Image (cartoon, rainbow, N blue to C red):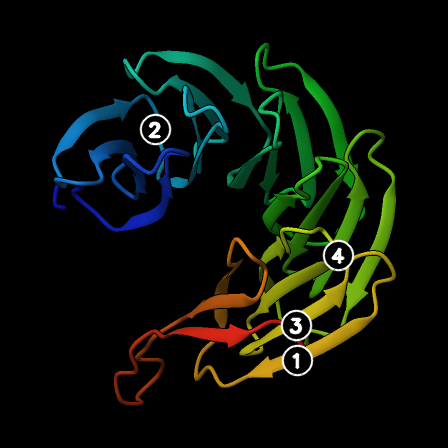
């Protein structure tokens, strides 16, 4: 698939697996046929690079977050812009609630915001992180949110009230990504310290630390059955050292 004029920053499959959305430094979101690789729609409207893209659970809408301090919601069939949500600093990541009624966003202003995905009304602002927030994830039942931050912590929140439930500390560098296991009992976090950590999502107890990446770990995801974990890390070069490719690793998450 070719078409973006600059780096791709985020990709997401539609729930039925037939389409793929990609976000880019070129300020656009593109929709692709996942079987043929053909480009179907280009979504234009952002004035800064697009940092994250997500399909709604019903596949009818796409949300995109941008450095231009906006989140946009689009009709996934027509590409028509439905809503623009305005913030005070660049947005970093997005996640729809499992029922598609809410949208969570993170930004450089150290907060997580929860929005009404139909009206664009801001419902909650979650404060407590002391640096930019890189990643956000809903639990499968939609009752909790987890966020990962440059302040080296992961926080778990009540998604209805915004109350902070847990702060997970153990990483020694910025935390780039966070994901709930499908059963909601565990959290995985990916850190710039080259490690992945598994946590008890109820108590906050650290269960495992997975090491093996040569660079900072930027992304983590559970398999649908919760038995495996995928992680992706940074490549190089850094400084005067030799080129180091990025890595994707698969782990047994059952321990």
Q: Quadrant of residue 189?
A: bottom right
Q: Is residue 196 left or right of residue 240?
A: right
**Residue at the (60%, 30%) spot, across then down:** 88
> Looking at the rendered structure, which numbered label has been put on residue 240?
none
**Label 4: few (<14), some (14–19) or many (≥20) C-alpha neighbours in 10 Å:** some
- In percent of width and height, residue 168 lies at 79, 63
Q: Earlier in the sequence, mark 3 or mark 2?
A: 2
Q: Earlier in the sequence, mark 2 or mark 1?
A: 2
Marks 1 and 3: in contact by CB < 8 Å?
Answer: yes
Q: Nearer the viewer, residue 75 or 250?
A: 250
Measured in 3D between alpha carbons, the distance from the residue under mark 1 to the one under mark 4, in whole angstroms, is: 17 Å
Measured in 3D between alpha carbons, the distance from the residue under mark 4 to the one under mark 2, in whole angstroms, is: 39 Å
Q: Earlier in the sequence, mark 3 or mark 1?
A: 3
Q: Residue furthest bottom?
A: 241
Measured in 3D between alpha carbons, the distance from the residue under mark 3 to the one under mark 4, in whole angstroms, is: 14 Å
> Could you tell me which secondary element the residue under label 4 belongs to?
loop
The residue indicated by pointer 3 is 197
Q: Earlier in the sequence, mark 4 or mark 2?
A: 2
Q: Earlier in the sequence, mark 3 or mark 4?
A: 4
Marks 1 and 2: in contact by CB < 8 Å?
Answer: no
Q: Earlier in the sequence, mark 1 or mark 4?
A: 4
**Residue at the (41%, 34%) spot, across then down:** 15
Q: Is residue 78 above or below residue 16?
A: above
Q: Is residue 88 left or right of residue 79?
A: right
Q: Quadrant of residue 30?
A: top left
> Looking at the rendered structure, which numbered label has been put on residue 47?
2
The residue indicated by pointer 4 is 185
- In percent of width and height, residue 73 lies at 45, 20
Q: Is residue 208 above or below residue 178?
A: below
């Amino acid at each position: 698939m070719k078409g973006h004029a600059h780096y791709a920053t985020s990709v997401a499959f539609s729930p039925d697996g037939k389409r793929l959305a990609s976000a880019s430094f070129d300020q656009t979101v593109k929709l692709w046929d996942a079987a043929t690789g053909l480009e179907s729609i280009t979504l234009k409207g952002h004035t800064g690079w697009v940092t994250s893209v997500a399909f709604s659970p019903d596949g009818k809408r796409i949300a995109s977050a941008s450095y231009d301090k906006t989140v946009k919601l689009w009709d996934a069939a027509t590409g028509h812009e439905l809503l623009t949500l305005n913030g005070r600093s660049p947005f970093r990541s997005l996640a729809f609630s499992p029922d598609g009624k809410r949208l969570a966003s993170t930004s450089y202003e150290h907060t997580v915001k929860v929005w009404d995905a139909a009206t664009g009304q801001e419902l909650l602002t979650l404060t407590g992180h002391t640096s930019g927030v890189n990643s956000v994830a809903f639990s499968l039942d939609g009752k909790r949110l987890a966020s990962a931050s440059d302040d080296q912590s992961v926080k778990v929140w009540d998604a209805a009230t915004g109350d902070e439930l847990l702060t997970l500390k153990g990483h020694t560098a910025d935390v780039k990504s966070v994901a709930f296991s499908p059963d909601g009992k565990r959290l995985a976090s990916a850190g710039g310290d080259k490690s992945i950590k598994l946590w008890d999502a109820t108590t906050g107890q650290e269960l495992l630390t997975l090491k093996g990446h040569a660079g900072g770990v930027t992304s983590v995801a559970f398999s649908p059955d919760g038995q495996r974990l995928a992680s992706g890390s940074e490549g190089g070069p850094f400084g005067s050292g030799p080129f180091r490719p990025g890595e994707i690793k698969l782990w047994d998450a059952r321990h």
